[in-house]
Amino acid sequence: MKKGLFATVMMFLSVSLVHAQNFTEQDTLRGSITPERAWWDLNYYHLDIEVKPDEKFITGSNTIRYKVLNEEQVLQVDLQPPLQIEKVTQDGKTLNFESKVNAHFVKLEKPQKVGDFNEIIVYYSGKPKEAVRAPWDGGFSWKKDENGKYFIATSCQGLGASVWWPNKDHMYDEVDSMLISVKAPKNLISVANGRLRKIAEDTNTKTYHWFVSNPINNYGVNVNIGDYVHFEEKYKGENGVLDLDYYVLRDDLKKAKEQFTDVPKLMKAFEHWFGPYPFYRDSFKLVQVPYLGMEHQSSVTYGNQFQKGYLGRDLSGTGWGLKFDYIIIHEAGHEWFANNITYKDIADMWVHEGFTTYSEALYVDYHYGKEAGSDYAIGIRSNIKNESPIIGTYNVNQRGSGDMYPKGANLLHTIRQIIDDDEKWRQILRGLNKDFYHQTVTSQQIENYISEKSGRDLSKVFDQYLRTTQIPLFEYQMEDGNIIKYRYTNVVDGFDMPLRVFVDEEPLWLNPTTEWQTEQADPNAATFKVDRNFYVNKKELQAE
């Protein structure tokens, strides 16, 4: 999700409540790799549910297959009230479990031998939390379309997938593959992640079976139910032919066929910058939902009302943001950064949102030129609050500041300038998606990778922009003979980011530190300015 131009958009999209607070046992159970999670590795899920719209009720089970890493006997499964676990079985035998609100500790009786693959089945039911303003608060959206037919969708980033189905609700461990079976009223279509395997029909219902063959993070799993119609096209991409599938409400088919022409354009731009689409085996779907949208893997959801920009607004204030449908570009960009490369801890959420917000600028760059892309990146700086750091608190499921969107993007835009080699920068972005393919990562891994591949220690740059609210202040003054005196203030210890300036429009590289330095410029030069592409503040001092 993305930071908006207006205060309400900023608030809702960031969901950033990064104030001093006391964390609870529930925060730790949700946000840390507990002993009851650490000893087993996810292998496969089969989520098998029936959705009953008239009652706003779901019932079903999740089969959890796992590999034993250590010989332990207690396994943590997560499911949030008001949903309830009815029973848990292994090899047909009912197991005991103890519950601590959202966390449920299953006592296994079967010996758990290292290297074995075992399964439990968790049966559950209830009325899941209803989303009031999806996707920011998470849960089920129980809506109806203009024809009075049910229009239903799930969303759960941050709050956790356990708000609607039982799972190992921590981002560090992705399941390798997954079958999603959804039974719903016969007159509706159920759409989920991956590819449709089969449809089973009885008197009043249909069950749609969707299979995900790639690793998938838990909040990326979704279910959408509506009076959908389907259309498709083929995209010839870097890894062959990619199926592009679209599911929209019946009355919106014409509008969708016009608006969704942005999809092949984004594939062309993002495969150029980031490498092949990461989920060719599972295809790409764009699915209309009754909320704004979300980056559900291979089942990206869309609710931007078939408008350019963000609900018709340009979040950059430059005009470039009205050249594309914001939700299509941003949420699909997450297929590379969020679904292919996934944070282990939500404290590092900037890895999803900073890179994906930056992808908007790269989309503009690819289709309209480098200067246009720079305009867009610089334009979104007006949304930055600098009230708290981008990186949050680890192990308690707390994200950092909503500045992770525009400020994270401008950090990356600034690093592109430091590297000063666009092809090298492109290969770094592609390398991230290749070398961390289908992996969960930490911010530190990403930071170290960019430093290593760029051949420059960027650790202080990352510390400055990710871990403080301070924006470097470049102070300078022009002395007789066009001597430039300059330094950085408002920076972390050891900050040494090079800076490009222009003297009479000619580029000049400076290497400011916190100590005053001088540089001789052309005595006949008439103008001096700092490159706008660097996210720094500047202050000209008067010569004494």
Image (cartoon, rainbow, N blue to C red):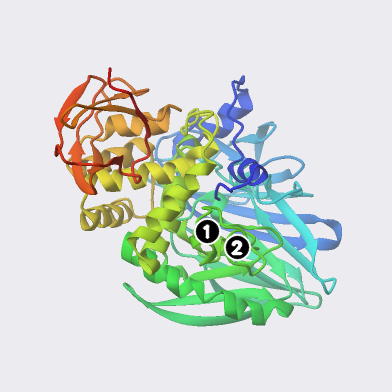
In this view, 93 is above or below 389: below
- Residue 6: x percent and y percent? 63, 46
> Which amino acid type is marked by label 1?
Glu
Label 1: few (<14), some (14–19) or many (≥20) C-alpha neighbours in 10 Å: many
| C-beta proximity under 8 Å, tags 1 and 2 | yes
Q: Alpha carbon of mark 1 to alpha carbon of mark 2: how far? A: 8 Å
- Across and down, in percent, residue 247 comes to 62, 74
The residue carrying mark 2 is: 301
- Image quarter hosting the C terminus: top left
Q: Which mark is residue 140?
A: none
Q: Quadrant of residue 464?
A: top left
First in residue order: circle 1 vs circle 2 = 2
Residue 397: x percent and y percent? 55, 33
Give the residue drawn at x 23%, y 19%. 515
Is label 2 in a helix, a strand or a loop?
strand
At 32% from the left and 50% from the top, the residue drawn is 436
From the viewer's side, name the closer residue of 367 and 509: 509
Q: Is residue 186 above or below residue 402?
A: below
| Residue in the foreground of this view, choosing between 3 and 5 | 5
Q: Secondary structure at mark 1?
A: helix
Q: Residue at x 65, y 44 (%)?
A: 12
Q: As displayed, is residue 249 above or below residue 347?
A: below
Determine the residue located farthest toward the top in the rendered image. 544
Would you place residue 84 above or below residue 199 in this image? Answer: above
Q: How many residues crowd mark 2 within 10 Å: few (<14), some (14–19), many (20+)?
A: many
Q: Position of residue 373 (x, y in %)?
A: 39, 58
What residue is shown with label 1?
A: 331
Q: Amino acid at mark 2?
A: Thr
Q: Is residue 417 visible?
A: yes
Residue 171 visible in the current orientation: no
Q: Nearer the viewer, residue 394 or 135?
A: 135
